[in-house]
Amino acid sequence: MNSLPIGIFDSGVGGLTVLRELRRLLPAEHLVYLGDTARVPYGNKSRATVRRYAEEDVQFLLGQGVKMIVIACNTASAMAAPELRERFPGVPILGMIGPGSRAARAATRNGRIGVIATAATIGSGAYEARIRASFAEKGGVPEEILAQACPLFVPLVEEGETSSAITRLVAEKYLAPLRGAGIDTLVLGCTHYPLLKGVIAELMGAGVALVDSAEAAAVETAALLGERGLLRGSEEGLGGEQFYVTDAAARFHAIAESFLGYAVDRLSLAELGLGL
Ligand code: DGL
């Protein structure tokens, strides 16, 4: 059981930020990644559609014999995580919202927290609810939670525009309501946003801690596997990686190699047999 892979899925390439953190933290684990590149983006779709896609993604990963699933997509986590856990009770399923929210609660000093994410994630109110729940666990309440959808960030990152003038302009527009609002913590509630950390940090200033939900999710994955005695031992050597996409494998391959900085040898088209 311990040698089985961790399954990770995202709507496309964005979840590679989570895979990279998992690899860093858990070098002995085998990882299977599914990017639903045929149906990306999820962030502007309805709850019913995202749930259906996410369910099909989980089913595919279960077919690969995974011991745990990480929903490396904030939108799918926000819109489908509770239903996925109910539907697939036999496997631990970790989403991004809980880890990101707990990390934000731990990071804030003044209780004023900003959240940026896709329109679907912000519209779901999932981060706000989880941040409040996380404060409540410690018997407190946040001072204020400010949420802001940043729909153009994903296409900008997809096009490699991570630090250009156009990205800065877009970021200035989206972050304007958050700057000067007194927040000391900002949750990067989308897989793509860690790639914009430079621009976001510069605009928000040194007094605002950026919470990377990918990092937080990797830390909680390690903790969950440890608690359940499911970690693969380091004496067994380095873990391998298998990647699947539902479309456009060549594009994914190029982005993955450039982002991860190593050769991605095992990439296949996933035959999900799905309608769009
Ligand atoms: N992976 C999505 C997220 O973290 C961003 C890309 C998309 O909209 O599908 O919300």
Image (spheres, helix red, strand yellow):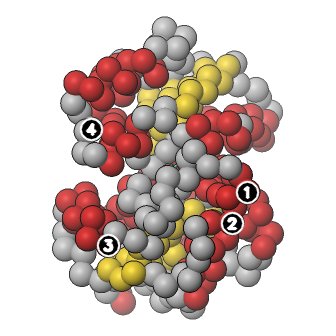
> Residue 22 versus residue 84: which sits nearer the camera?
84
Instruction: Work out which quarter of the rendered image holds the N terminus and state it.
Output: bottom right
63 up-or-down from 200: above or below = below
> Residue 78 versus residue 1: which sits nearer the camera?
78
Label tally: 4
Please name the residue that numbered disc 4 is placed on.
162
The amino acid type, in three-letter code, at marker 1 is Ala
Please name the residue that numbered disc 2 is placed on.
52
Between disc 4 and disc 3, whose residue precedes?
Answer: 4
Labelled pair 4, 3 in contact (Cβ < 8 Å) = no
Between disc 3 and disc 1, whose residue precedes?
Answer: 1
Labelled pair 3, 1 in contact (Cβ < 8 Å) = no
Disc 3 to disc 1, C-alpha distance: 27 Å
Per the image, label 2 sits on a secondary structure element best described as helix
The amino acid type, in three-letter code, at marker 2 is Arg
Disc 2 to disc 4, C-alpha distance: 31 Å
Please name the residue that numbered disc 1 is placed on.
48
Between disc 2 and disc 4, whose residue precedes?
Answer: 2
The amino acid type, in three-letter code, at marker 4 is Thr
Per the image, label 3 sits on a secondary structure element best described as helix
Per the image, label 1 sits on a secondary structure element best described as helix
Labelled pair 2, 1 in contact (Cβ < 8 Å) = yes
Please name the residue that numbered disc 3 is placed on.
249
Disc 2 to disc 3, C-alpha distance: 22 Å
> Residue 218 versus residue 56: which sits nearer the camera?
56
Of badges 4 and 1, nearer the viewer stands 1
Q: Position of residue 194 (x, y in %)?
A: 38, 43
Labelled pair 4, 1 in contact (Cβ < 8 Å) = no
The amino acid type, in three-letter code, at marker 3 is Ala
Labelled pair 2, 4 in contact (Cβ < 8 Å) = no
